[in-house]
Amino acid sequence: MINLDYLCMKCGNEIAECEGKKTDKENLVTKAMGVLQENGPYAMFLYLEGHSKNDIAGYCKKVLLNLFRKEQQLADCIKVETTIPQKDDKFSDIMAWLRKVSSDVDRLFFLKKICQQVLIYARYHIKALEEPKEGGT
């Protein structure tokens, strides 16, 4: 049996610990969560790709995709004819995979729920981070 909440917590923490200012991380995760809730996983990954020049967005996308790549039981739950593209694949391959997942509403809602939980935990982790003190002391 797989503990999905633990995996979401772990990934949320990983996103929160990435390099960058606390406010930048919080803004990006909040906006990605809004896109996910309003428009779904496909739109959220497009949003993250569109902002991937921002290291935080690229890292967030990488963490979410790695969750489905590395956790075989989780990947099996959303398995479609096409497997999730590996690290070096083109973004168009990731979009093709997401379109395949979206063709099955149960898999789509499962993917959305996992991404949403990861982003919720990331946001709470980020809020709990201490702001660096000004002046360097």
Image (tube, helix red, strand yellow):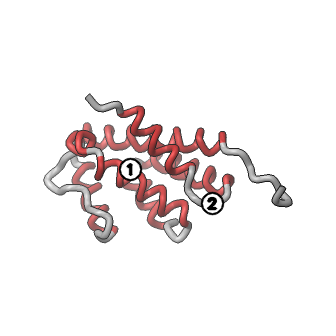
Q: What is the quadrant of residue 56 in the picture?
A: bottom right
Q: In this view, does 76 lie to the left or right of 127?
A: left
Considering the numbered disc 2 on the image, is that residue within a helix, a strand or a loop? loop
Picture quarter containing residue 90?
bottom left
Q: Which amino acid does label 2 sit on?
A: Gly
- Label 2: which residue? 20
The C terminus, quarter of image = bottom right
Q: In this view, does 2 lie above or below 80?
A: above
Q: Residues within 10 Å of mark 1 (few under 14, many from 20)?
A: many
Which mark's residue is nearer the viewer, 2 or 1? 2
Residue type, label 1: Pro
Disc 2 from disc 1: Cα separation: 24 Å
Q: Which corner quadrant of the image does residue 10 belong to?
A: top left
- Res 41 label: 1
Q: Which of 130 and 31 is in front in this view?
A: 130
Mark nearer the N terminus (2 vs 1)? 2
Residue 2 makes an appearance in the image: yes
What's the mark number on residue 86?
none
The structure residue drawn at horizontal position 67% and vertical position 58%, both measured from the top left corner, is 21
Q: Residue at x 29, y 55 (%)?
A: 98
